[in-house]
Amino acid sequence: MTSPHEGPQEAPIVPPPPGTIADLFQEALPDIEFTATQGAGDVILIVGRDDVPRVLRTAKDDPRLDLKYLRCLLGVDHMDGGLEVVYQLYSFTHKHGVTIKTRLPLDDPRVASAASIWKGADWLERETAEMFGITFEGHPNPVPLLLPDDMTDHHPLRKDNPFAQVEEWQGVRLGAEASKAGHIPAGYESIAGEGGEEDGG
Amino acid sequence: MAVEDKDKTATPSRALSGLEREAERLRPVEVQHPHALYREVLPGVIQAPADYLLAMARKSSLWPMTFGLACCAIEMMSAYMSHHDLDRFGIVPWASPRQADVMIVAGTVTKKMAPSVKLLYEQMPNPKWVVAMGSCATNGGPYTRYDRVVQGVDKLVPVDVYVPGCPPRPEALIDGLIALQEMIMRDRGSIG
Amino acid sequence: MLTDQERELETLDIHVNVGPQHPATHGVFRMVLTVSGEKVVDVVPHIGYMHRGAEKLSEGMDYRQALIYQDRTEYLAQFNAELCYCLAVEKLAGLEVPERAEYIRVILTELNRITSHYMFVGAFATDIGVYGTAFTYAFREREYIQEIFDAVSGDRMMYGYFRPGGVVWDVTDDFKDRVRWVCGQTRVGIDDIDRLLTKNEIFLTRCLDIGVISKEDAIDYGLSGPMLRACGLPFDLRRAEPYSIYDRFQFDIPTGTRGDVYDRYLVRMEEMRQSVRIVEQALEEMPDGAIMPEKAPRRLRLPPGEVYMRTENPRGEYGIYLVSKGGEKPYRLKIRSSCLSNLTALKQMVVGHYVADAVVILGSVDIVLGEVDR
């Protein structure tokens, strides 16, 4: 995942400048705890798991926010930090957008479903559920979307799910050591180098 | 039909009638080459071993089942179209497996798709061949480290020709299909 | 019209499986139609037959290698996908792209949009029943453009030509002349297909008022691209949230009114013409110079952060949500697939139409299964 001499680092929380959509959210929902940070593109709002249905419903219905367009819904596996669900919203009338994130504990990955708010969230939640093992409560049709029906026991995008083993390399059956990422088969060490060092390429 | 007995070397003093021209056309030709296929048995009839004829017929009219799965399908379609034109080899894409001869597996086979691949292969009547087009069909390609991908279609069906590339150029696919044609011709004794 | 006797007849709704291998499904897509007579009562799409794990595999590769999965995910508009990925990485890394590389990228991206729309027109017309004619025309025109891509990047399809920071090598000397010739040829080609299809009575009967979706529903489902513009909303990411150098070019945004299949076709045809306009403007302005930044790092190590980069793909809004936690490999690379969101509205558009229309509506969504399933 990361280079061997550095562990994963979190991005610092940079409070957004005044006048962004974070202030509109604060006005519309004064009693909810937000952590607002300015990401590389949009403002990111981190909310608690139980506040998610209210926040999303207000985001869509409130005329100041009018975030009627759900662009993206994804999950992130932060290993010990838990799982995270990210919603990316946009408004055509006000031309502003926001990212809303919420953390879920690893032992209890449940969050309310947004399928009743945006119809497009239906399939996106199905996919996130099968990839990470997150349960979306209230989802009308929680069946797997992309994975075959007999392979839904382990969730591919979780970090503890390894890559598959290459079964055969140049006609030679490989053993268990081939499943480590970065394994170089015998005889190819000289051309493998350090992982590609061409300038600009 | 009655044929006037004419001297072959004499030039006729008048135009030949229709019957006479027909007789002239059907007069058998002596070919002295020892390996000549055309023999002087009956005029206008080819004499050749039956398996040779069958193999020639099969290779000249390979109808692939349209089995484009992923990106290689676009290059396969390019090969069918006018720029590269597979139709001149007799290769006409046909959607139904029941009338198809060859299955060009163009693209990645996932574990969800694998039963369909097997079923379609079994639905094709004999003689049938399989061309694994692209690196995904050969061994899983760039997606080989994902556990939902079948690492090569030869884990499901027997493959006759592997065409490497990601995706292979239409010329490479044509090369693969010509190799398949040569293979059909070469193995003509063993195919029923 | 049904008589009273017929209305009392007990009929059975049958399930028609338009299976994963089908000439009209644009790839391995399966839908199970429940039909009553000829009218579709319910449709259940099944996807995932092309799920190859591009997102998972990108986590195991560094930022330069993960580019290859973008090509193979969106295998008809590869430069668009590569551009989105490179922009996402550049945004997080803070890389400055030189001018010449920007113009090369825009030219190639717009030409790729044209090839993608040609593919749409060919496949769509084949779904309607124009067996082979429009498809052959479209592929002939695509070949002219694909030859340019082949000369520039070395591959006919999976280019891998863009890099975070610019492009990998400079274009050939005859690039400008070839692209200029191709622009003229494309105008002729679009007119050819236009004359064949647009005012054709059979085409109109099969496309007008089929698969209508309202603007509010389209926004709710998350539709984007030509599907959303055909409903009447003139939203184009190149104009609304300009990326790269699109704010320097003059182009119109074709918008439909009815939200039906015919409008989607017209929107895409007109987009091709607008793309030619953009390419011609870019050719005029393209400067000489470097194609990668001066101090391009040998190993791309990004600071921790997240970005959601979205670009206007031929099929809609293609997004890359990139989570970086330091290091050389992406921590999470989520591909926001335009086709997947467009496909969620399939049931609403198809129910109530005939079986033959279901195929036409699916064709008008213009799906690429590599992107739907990733």
Image (cartoon, coloured by chain):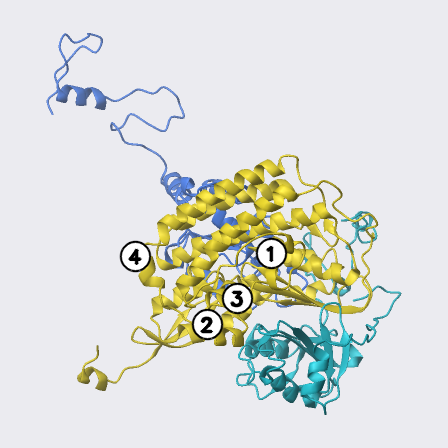
Q: Are marks 4 and 3 in contact (CB under 8 Å)?
A: no
Residue pointed to by mark 1: B136
* Label drawn at residue C346: 2
SS category of the residue bearing label 4: helix
SS category of the residue bearing label 3: loop
B139 is higher (above) or lower (below) than C325: above
To the question of a shared chain for discs 2 and 4, the answer is yes
Residue pointed to by mark 3: B113
- Say which residue appears at 73% left-offset and 65% top-offset: C59
Horizontal and vertical percent position of residue B1: 11, 25
Front residue of C134 and C234: C234
Report crowding for label 1: few under 14, some 14 to 19, many 20 or more residues within 10 A (C-alpha). Answer: many
Q: Name the subunit of mark 1.
A: B
Q: Name the subunit of mark 2.
A: C
Q: Which chain is blue?
A: B
Residue sticking out furthest to the bottom: A31
Locate residue A201 relative to residue B144 in the image: left or right. right
Q: Are marks 3 and 2 in contact (CB under 8 Å)?
A: no
To the question of a shared chain for discs 3 and 2, the answer is no
Q: Which chain is yellow?
A: C
